[in-house]
Image: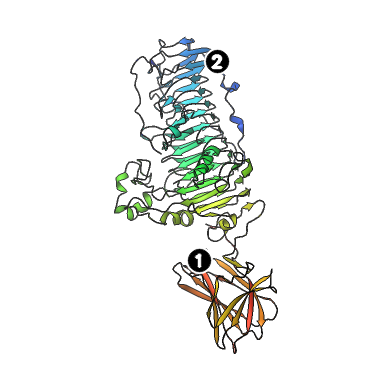
């Protein structure tokens, strides 16, 4: 969620200044698509953080001690910080203001210490600044502000540094920044806060860093709902590669992209043991999340929800109003999640759309509009124009074009947080809420629930599941098993396996008459009686007997108007039962299967003949539910010459036929 950000601070007191062409970005090796992330970015405390033991040729040597009198503002100059502790003076605004093209390099053991007095280490908007091999610690940036690159300068290269034990964010970012090989540890708020006023960050690279222990000040609990915690956060970044990082043990989410980000690659990262979500992609566009190892995340936040009885599916990967949008230039036009291993997180993937959250809605936590309308054009999304195209489509983030495929989802509830309650954990989700607000919203009722589940090209397929996964679909109250998830009502996970097999979609209705003596939901319609029979059944011990009560027409119907739900129009269904003569002479019976819409109107009736049989015989048919169908019921109709003849039925079922992949 968007927050108001302070303007860049100029030198208000004692400053250590410093200058002029942008540095060219180095190429980055993204690895191969089949590579699984490991802790290759275990850089904290490693020798990769040690700088050169001698200064580069032509460098200005900066001695350890108080550097407040050193001129560090010269452009195109290399500064070499000798081994030892360096300070910038005692004023809170003492800071380094580099010149364009300046380079700052630390010798082994070079520490830049803010003494818990200075707010910032490197500030202002010089371009092409490089910072390498320094330990930067003890600065006390306010919330939402950063210690290094405080003003989001463009073209900065920040690599092989240790930035730890500071307040606020370890660093900010500008356009074409390269942030590589750093240890970003135990900072008060974020490891990285990639925000720049005017939303001009492009071409950002965050590679091979270790983000750990950040948000030590626990801001989400200090300011509930602030949306201001975690390992790294991105705001309105257009083009970012987040690759090869080890993101672990942060007190909040691991990777969080919030508000109008676009064109992200999140690949080959190891994301584990974060208190909250591993990856959070929120009101943003077009991302590839590929070949990451994601494990043991969201235990703390999931348990916190469970303790409150909150059923919202806390996820490892959370998509909140995230759109695959072909109208925006990017490396993909989807939200593609593929090739990842998710293991023993609190949950799986939650794809969510808040029906009440759209541009200009009071329910939105950002003042920005969508990138399609324009982030500053909020007022366009007003009544009555928003109720018509193109604004109806363009004024909201929909959660659409989500493609989840070829991932491995492993879940053992006993291994999650010492044992997690499965009514809350181990869930995959595709859902929304009932739209209610504001009163001029054109998205009220089930509009967004219908869209996210059926109309937005959101597809899970060809995944591998192990463990007791459950699925929340449409709304939080609908928690279903894999068989329903893959069945015709939702049509998800075609080609996927669950514990090595493929789940069978459950029957729309299955009756074996084994429950005591009940005849429900059958009732005489006219000229008939209905009774439960024990013994002599086709399967088990129970069956249902229908008897002619008069020498004329007879009928029995279901007493569950408007019928069984869960029927999907256009889907093939196999309809079957077993029957036999109970009292001679059984008349010819017609089994009428009636397809209904949600209001109960019969759209079509399919008839199956039950000719006289003295031994148990199967009667069956395969029918495609007509357009508009959501329910089904049936009747039995016959004519008897006398009262008394009877027949039995058993093992009645209506099941989906062959399923096809959802598109």
Look at the numbered disc 2 and give the secondary structure of its residue: loop
Q: How many labels does the image show?
A: 2
Label ID, residue 229? none
Q: Is residue 455 visible?
A: yes
Q: How is the image coloured?
A: rainbow
Left or right of residue 319, residue 438 in this image? left
Closer-to-camera residue (363/137):
363
Look at the numbered disc 1 and give the secondary structure of its residue: loop
Residue 215, image x, y percentages: 48, 30
Q: In the figure, 347 relative to 57: above or below?
A: below
Left or right of residue 533, residue 224 in this image? left
Quick check: marks 2 and 1 in contact, CB under 8 Å? no
Residue 385, image x, y percentages: 30, 53
Q: In the figure, 278 relative to 172: above or below?
A: below
Q: Distance between the residues labelled 2 and 1?
A: 70 Å
Q: Can residue 148 be seen in this view?
A: no
Closer-to-camera residue (304/266):
304
Q: Residue at x 49, y 20 (%)?
A: 136
What residue would you read off at disc 1?
569
Q: In which quarter of the image is the N terminus?
A: top left
Residue projecting furthest to the front: 517
Graded by Cα atoms within 10 Å as few (under 14), some (14 to 19) or many (20 or more), the crowding at tag 1 reads some
Q: Which residue is drawn at 34% across and 19% down?
A: 11
Left or right of residue 60, residue 498 in this image? right
Label ID, residue 109? 2
Quadrant of the rendered image containing residue 517:
bottom right
């Amino acid at each position: 969620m968007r927050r108001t950000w302070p303007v860049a601070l100029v030198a208000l007191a004692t400053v250590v200044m410093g200058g002029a062409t942008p540095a060219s970005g180095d190429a980055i090796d993204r690895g191969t698509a089949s590579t699984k992330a490991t802790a290759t970015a275990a850089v904290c405390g490693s020798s990769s953080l040690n700088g050169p033991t001698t200064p580069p040729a032509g460098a200005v040597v900066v001695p350890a001690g108080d550097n407040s009198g050193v001129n560090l503002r010269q452009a195109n100059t290399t500064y070499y910080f000798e081994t030892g502790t360096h300070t910038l003076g005692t004023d809170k605004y003492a800071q380094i203001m580099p010149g364009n093209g300046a380079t700052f390099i630390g010798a082994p053991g070079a520490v830049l210490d803010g003494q818990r007095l200075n707010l910032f280490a490197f500030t202002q908007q010089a371009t092409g600044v490089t910072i390498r091999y320094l330990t930067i610690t003890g600065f006390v940036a306010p919330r939402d502000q950063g210690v290094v690159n405080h003003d989001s300068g463009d073209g900065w290269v920040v690599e092989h540094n240790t930035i730890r034990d500071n307040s606020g964010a370890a660093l900010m970012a500008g356009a074409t920044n390269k942030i590589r090989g750093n240890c970003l540890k135990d900072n008060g708020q974020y490891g990285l806060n990639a925000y720049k006023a005017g939303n001009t960050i492009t071409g950002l690279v965050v590679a091979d860093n270790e983000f750990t222990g950040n948000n030590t000040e626990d801001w989400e609990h200090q300011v509930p709902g602030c949306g201001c915690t975690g390992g790294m956060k991105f705001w309105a970044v257009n083009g970012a590669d987040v690759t090869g990082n080890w993101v672990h043990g942060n007190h909040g989410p691991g990777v969080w992209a919030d508000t109008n980000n676009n064109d992200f690659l999140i690949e080959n990262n190891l994301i584990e043991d974060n208190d909250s979500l591993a990856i959070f992609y929120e009101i943003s566009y077009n991302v590839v999340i590929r070949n990451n190892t994601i494990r043991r995340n969201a235990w703390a936040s999931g348990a916190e929800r469970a303790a409150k009885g909150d059923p919202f599916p806390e996820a490892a990967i959370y998509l909140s109003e995230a759109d695959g949008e072909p109208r925006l230039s990017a490396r993909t036009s989807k939200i593609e999640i593929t090739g990842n291993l998710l293991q023993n997180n609190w949950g799986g993937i939650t794809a969510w759309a808040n029906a009440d959250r759209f541009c200009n809605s009071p329910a939105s936590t950002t003042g920005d509009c969508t990138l399609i309308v324009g982030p500053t054009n909020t007022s366009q999304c007003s009544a009555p124009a928003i109720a018509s195209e193109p604004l109806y489509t363009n004024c909201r983030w929909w959660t659409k074009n989500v493609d989840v495929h070829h991932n491995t989802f492993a879940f053992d509830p006993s291994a999650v947080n010492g044992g997690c309650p499965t009514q809350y954990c181990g869930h995959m989700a595709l859902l929304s809420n009932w739209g209610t607000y504001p009163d001029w919203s054109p998205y009220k009722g089930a509009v967004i629930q219908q869209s996210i589940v059926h109309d937005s090209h959101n597809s899970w397929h060809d995944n591998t599941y192990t463990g007791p996964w459950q699925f929340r679909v449409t709304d939080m109250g609908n928690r279903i098993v894999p068989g329903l998830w893959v069945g015709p009502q939702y049509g998800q996970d075609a080609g996927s396996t669950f514990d090595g097999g493929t789940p069978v979609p459950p029957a729309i209705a299955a009756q074996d008459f084994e429950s005591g003596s009940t005849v429900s939901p059958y009732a005489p319609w006219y000229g008939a009686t209905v009774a439960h029979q024990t013994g002599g059944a086709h399967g088990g011990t129970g069956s249902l007997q229908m008897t002619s009560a008069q020498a004329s027409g007879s009928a029995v119907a279901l007493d569950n108007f408007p019928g069984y739900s869960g029927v999907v129009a256009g889907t093939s269904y196999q309809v079957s039962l077993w029957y036999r003569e109970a009292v001679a002479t059984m008349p010819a019976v017609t089994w009428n299967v009636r397809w209904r819409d949600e209001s109960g109107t019969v759209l079509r009736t399919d008839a199956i003949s039950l000719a006289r049989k003295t031994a148990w015989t199967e009667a069956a048919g395969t029918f495609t539910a007509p357009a508009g169908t959501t329910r089904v019921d049936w009747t039995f109709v016959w004519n008897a010459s006398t009262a008394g003849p009877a027949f039995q039925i058993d093992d009645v079922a209506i099941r989906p036929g062959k399923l096809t992949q959802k598109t």
